[in-house]
């Protein structure tokens, strides 16, 4: 090994040796290191070293990567070092992109090392001979564990790991992770009692902000920030290679198009990269970046991870990164070679983002990095796992329960919850009334649960995967060459001949055929830009706190740094018309407009907490008299909009509105009055196998299985209100969407603060940003028929006599 | 509960908030897309749907019969959801209901689901017919686009109207009354809906729980 490193003129880092030694002793652990620091070699050579001891055929090393797109690159990296050190070793990948011939061959005998995703691993576990396939497994590596541990794919990985560990008690498991606020927990979840090895090489990081030329003319709200086009183009021009990160795919499409219009000579030199583009297009961009052929790539989180692009000198972040960890991750994409500096520049898209930029720079300086919390016993993932294991050789209840409890997320799974999940797959849910016609998983004469029906088995394998996307439609040219995918809902709104912007091109919609939208190139009007679902990331508490502290300074007349200088005029307007929120004062504004009666509140607690607060407040106000509210939230505050005048001041200033008494009851009641649980249920229904998405060219017989998640939601609510998937939907809304814990502490905080109530005649800078939010939540305590009657009256009035 | 009285092809009819149509002169109730046994079909394919939807459908029919003097119910297609809807438990519930209404005439105009599901059990004593089924001035159908003599009353599309104001929007099941045909909302308790854009000549009546409203401005 030493010789191999020496031959390349490389030095062995102490942390690499530490991993090798630990792995040799059979220990598991977590390696904490940034990308491009030799972390891959650390764990991979550890695996090869262990493998030298045995020459048996079959799978020895499993390498789990969070993204399909990373698999190919990882594979190349692993192959090139193995070629010298362990010639004759077969190393392959298996993901959703793998062709069927390779899959079939792999199904007979797996290569020595396999690079795969959590979903593809689960599909392997659903094969009847799964246990034999993994009989020689010796080491498992989870790459970019920080990306997985906070979501359901991480839970899926935990369950797969529990299974493999059960088969191979001596399995050596290593995770690779970037910096997290809860690194200790990250290790604990993946490898209990494992060691944490600290990789080193903290990279030098430079971070600054592009300040608009005329801050006073900079818009108060918006998300595109096209005013910053020229300054951004100038920055790109000055560097050999730049990544321009956008927060959404639509934003990336528009920025790419606008850059190209501003600098036509860059055609072919700049490119677009996001998750909905066709695989070939994405690979072309990645190759171009690696070879230094591209001057700039406009991208989304699709380029957050993995693959090293050595030539990238510079990263621009359009809009707020919303968290310190993400900012660091993206900054790390530049200045990759040792000794070079990572350089990231923030590009605000509206005035208030200058405030976030100032906070973010402070947060990076203090290294306030957010934690990623693993989900607690999601029952939908468990239900899916039960069917997987029933297919993969079958299971006995008590044995599998013991195994599942070794997965961190299910360590506290109760007997009742287990029994419910088992009944759900075996009997259809209610333990007392068995459905004779229901059969998904059934125990055989020996008490081993199996899947008796081939159709159920096939649908389950196709549905595996906890990443839930909207129903998508392929976009193809008339000759059949693929461009990528968009959501079904977007295409449904297009008529023949309509233009839309996709993949950096203007396209004309021709026709729809079996889940494929056929298009041709067009010129002229750009038309619509597809919008993809996908929640907006809330401002992290860490960043929110940093922002409030900046505001505190502003009230004291201190404006440090170019960001705060630039936003000073705006903050002064806010102060003049109303007041500045600070850590001890909550600012509340009431306003009347043609739209109705507005209430603005600015707790600065992040959008999830604001949604919870707004729903709670709306519910508490509407309890006294039925009303319907439209709710807008952003990271700074929330707005309630009601069609009729309400006594805002009394409701808010008597102190009862923000009380934590009956908090859970009131929040749950407010959930029933809104559509949050129903939306969350959509994902759960898919993972638990209630909804079968179908596939192109599906046999007709599957059509009778079509029902929407909202229909399921209603039926469950009416006829099986205790159903735990409903409970889970509620719990997930409470924990993830509304962040109940943070909500409670925010309420405590609000009760301590003074309220500063202002009736304003026009929207203040903070209020304006909320008024123009397009996505609005509804909360109603009106009876449906009263609500319809009122809506009809409003339409009548709007139409005039 | 409000019912809306209107005239179709010269006959006085009532649009009911229970998502059915009552034709007093013929003492007939028209019901479209009840999809009996849909939940059972899902269960048979391994998708757990709770019990109770058949009971709910039957209770809804029961309510209609107690509030309106009817000698006959005509089902405008999709009476059974699929073959698996012929499950014994589902059938038993329907037979119990049938036993309480021995005199009632039941007629089913076959819809696309009925073709796959097969005719309902003979014990239910349902008279079978194919569309268009002529009845007075009406052609009773499952599919609304059948070309035939007579004013078409049909189902099949499960129509839903998107009611929108500046700040809210709601999806509501609806009746679509046109010059040549009327489409009824789906009656079944486990049926979804399809948003559609009504033709300019259509009158749209939305159903909101116990009330029906005419949409005048759209």
Image (tube, coloured by chain):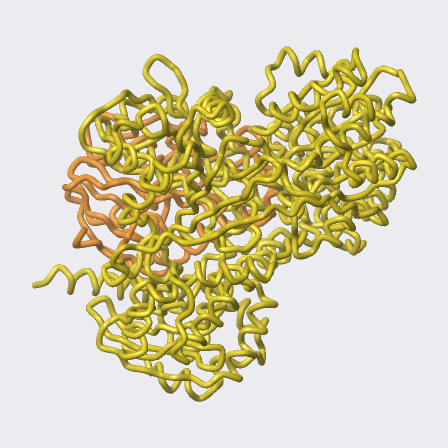
Residue under the image location 32 percent in, 78 percent down: A575
Residue B119 horizontal side relative to residue A721, left or right: left
Across and down, in percent, residue A144 comes to 65, 39
Q: Residue furthest bottom?
A: A654
Does residue A59 lie above or below B197 as drawn?
above
Q: Can residue B118 be seen in the rendering of this structure?
A: no
Q: Quadrant of residue B148?
A: top left
Residue under the image location 36 percent in, 35 percent down: B156
Residue under the image location 81 percent in, 48 percent down: A405
Decide which of A526, A480 is in the foreground and name it. A526
Q: Can residue A30 be seen in the rendering of this structure?
A: yes
Across and down, in percent, residue A622 comes to 40, 75
Across and down, in percent, residue B172 comes to 34, 51
Does residue B108 lie above or below B99 as drawn?
above
Q: Quadrant of residue B85?
A: top right
How many labels, in total? Answer: 0
Across and down, in percent, residue A25 comes to 92, 37
Residue under the image location 58 percent in, 74 percent down: A745
Residue A560 horizontal side relative to residue A415, left or right: left
Residue B98 horizontal side relative to residue A348, left or right: right
Split into 4 quadrants, where in the image is the N terminus of chain A?
top right
**Colour chain A appears in:** yellow
Split into 4 quadrants, where in the image is the C terminus of chain A?
bottom left
**Colour chain B appears in:** orange
Residue A381 horizontal side relative to residue A542, left or right: right
């Amino acid at each position: 090994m030493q010789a191999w490193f020496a031959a390349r003129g490389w030095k062995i880092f102490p942390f690499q040796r530490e991993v090798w030694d630990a792995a040799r002793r059979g220990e598991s652990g977590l390696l904490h290191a940034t990308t491009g620091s030799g972390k891959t070699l650390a764990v991979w050579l550890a695996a090869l070293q262990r493998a030298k001891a045995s020459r048996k055929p079959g799978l020895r090393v499993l390498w789990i990567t969070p993204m399909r797109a990373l698999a190919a690159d990882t594979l190349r990296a692993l192959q090139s070092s193995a070629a010298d050190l362990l010639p004759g070793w077969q190393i392959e990948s298996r993901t959703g992109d793998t062709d069927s011939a390779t899959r079939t061959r792999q199904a007979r005998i797996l290569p020595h090392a396999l690079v795969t995703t959590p979903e593809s691993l689960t599909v392997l576990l659903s094969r009847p001979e799964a246990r034999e396939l993994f009989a020689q497994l010796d080491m498992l590596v989870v790459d970019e564990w920080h990306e997985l541990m906070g979501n359901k794919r991480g839970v899926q990985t935990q369950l797969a790991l529990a299974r493999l560990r059960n088969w191979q008690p001596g399995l050596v498991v290593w995770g690779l992770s970037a910096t997290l606020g809860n690194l200790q927990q990250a290790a604990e979840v993946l490898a209990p009692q494992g060691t944490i090895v600290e990789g080193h090489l903290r990279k030098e990081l430079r971070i600054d902000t592009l300040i608009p030329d005329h801050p006073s003319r900079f818009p108060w709200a918006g998300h595109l920030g096209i005013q910053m086009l020229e300054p951004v183009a100038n920055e790109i021009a000055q560097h050999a290679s730049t990544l321009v990160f956008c927060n959404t795919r639509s934003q990336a499409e528009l920025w790419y198009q606008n850059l190209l219009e501003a600098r036509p000579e860059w055609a072919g030199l700049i490119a677009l990269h996001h998750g909905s583009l066709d695989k070939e297009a994405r690979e072309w961009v990645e190759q171009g970046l690696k070879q230094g052929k591209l001057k700039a790539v406009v991208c989304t989180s699709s380029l957050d991870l993995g693959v090293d692009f050595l030539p990238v000198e510079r990263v621009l972040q359009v809009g707020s990164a919303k968290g310190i960890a993400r900012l660091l991750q993206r900054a790390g994409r530049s200045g990759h070679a040792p000794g070079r500096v990572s350089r990231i520049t923030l590009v605000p898209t509206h005035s208030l983002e200058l405030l976030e930029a100032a906070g973010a720079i402070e947060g990076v300086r203090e290294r306030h990095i957010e934690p990623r919390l693993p989900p607690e016993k999601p029952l939908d993932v468990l239900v899916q796992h039960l069917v997987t294991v029933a297919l993969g050789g079958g299971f006995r209840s008590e044995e599998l329960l013991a195994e599942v409890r070794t997965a961190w997320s299910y360590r506290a799974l109760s007997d009742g919850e287990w029994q419910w999940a088992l009944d759900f797959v075996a009997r259809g849910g209610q333990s007392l009334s068995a459905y004779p016609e229901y059969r998904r998983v059934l125990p055989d004469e020996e008490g081993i649960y199996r899947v008796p029906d081939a159709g159920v088995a096939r649908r389950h394998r196709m549905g595996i995967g906890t990443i839930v996307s909207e129903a998508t439609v392929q976009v193809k040219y008339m000759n059949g060459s693929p461009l990528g995918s968009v959501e079904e809902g977007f295409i449904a709104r297009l008529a023949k001949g309509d233009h839309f912007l996709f993949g950096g091109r203007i396209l004309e919609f021709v026709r729809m055929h079996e889940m494929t939208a056929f298009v041709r190139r067009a010129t002229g009007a750009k038309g619509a830009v597809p919008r993809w679902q996908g929640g907006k990331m809330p401002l992290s508490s860490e960043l929110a706190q940093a922002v409030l502290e900046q505001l505190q300074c502003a009230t004291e007349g201190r404006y440090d740094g170019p960001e705060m200088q630039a936003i000073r005029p705006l903050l002064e307007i806010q102060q003049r018309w109303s007041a500045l929120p600070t850590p001890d004062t909550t600012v509340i504004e009431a306003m009347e407009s043609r739209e109705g009666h507005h209430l603005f509140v600015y707790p600065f607690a992040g959008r999830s907490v604001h949604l919870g607060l707004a729903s709670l407040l709306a519910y508490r106000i509407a309890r006294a008299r039925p009303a319907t509210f439209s709710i807008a939230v952003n990271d700074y505050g929330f707005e309630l909009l009601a069609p009729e005048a309400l006594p805002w001041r009394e409701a808010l200033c008597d102190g009862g509105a923000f009380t934590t008494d009956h908090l859970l009851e009131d929040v749950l009641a407010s959930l029933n009055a809104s559509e949050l649980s129903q939306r969350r249920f959509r994902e759960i229904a898919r993972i638990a196998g209630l909804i079968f998405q179908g596939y192109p060219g599906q046999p007709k017989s599957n059509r009778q299985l079509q029902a929407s998640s909202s229909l399921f939601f209603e039926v469950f609510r009416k006829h099986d209100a205790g159903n735990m998937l409903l409970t889970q939907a509620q719990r997930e809304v409470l924990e993830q969407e509304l962040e109940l814990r943070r909500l409670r502490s925010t309420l405590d905080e609000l009760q301590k603060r003074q309220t500063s109530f202002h009736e304003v005649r026009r929207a203040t800078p903070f209020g304006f940003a909320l008024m123009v939010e397009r996505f609005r939540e509804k909360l109603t305590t009106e009876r449906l028929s009263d609500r319809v009657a009122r809506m009809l009256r409003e339409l009548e009035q709007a139409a005039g006599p | 509960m409000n019912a809306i009285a209107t005239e179709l092809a010269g006959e006085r009819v009532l649009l009911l908030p229970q998502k059915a149509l009552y034709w007093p002169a013929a003492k007939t109730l028209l019901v479209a897309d009840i999809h009996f046994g849909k939940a059972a079909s899902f269960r048979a394919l391994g998708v757990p749907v709770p019990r109770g939807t058949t009971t709910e459908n039957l209770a809804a029919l029961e309510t209609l019969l107690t509030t309106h003097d009817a000698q006959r119910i005509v089902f405008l297609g999709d009476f059974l959801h699929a073959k698996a809807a012929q499950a014994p438990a589902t059938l038993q519930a329907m037979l119990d209901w049938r036993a309480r209404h021995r005199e009632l005439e039941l007629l089913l105009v076959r819809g696309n689901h009925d073709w796959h599901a097969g005719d309902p059990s003979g014990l239910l004593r349902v008279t079978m017919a194919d569309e268009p089924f002529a009845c007075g001035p009406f052609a009773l159908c499952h599919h609304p686009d059948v070309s035939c003599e007579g004013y078409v009353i049909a189902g099949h599309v499960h129509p839903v109207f998107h009611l929108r104001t500046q700040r809210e929007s709601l999806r509501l099941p609806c009746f679509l009354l046109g010059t040549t045909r009327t489409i009824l909302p789906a009656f079944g308790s486990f049926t979804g809906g399809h948003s559609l854009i009504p033709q300019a000549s259509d009158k749209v009546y939305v159903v909101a729980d116990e009330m029906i409203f005419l949409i005048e401005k759209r």
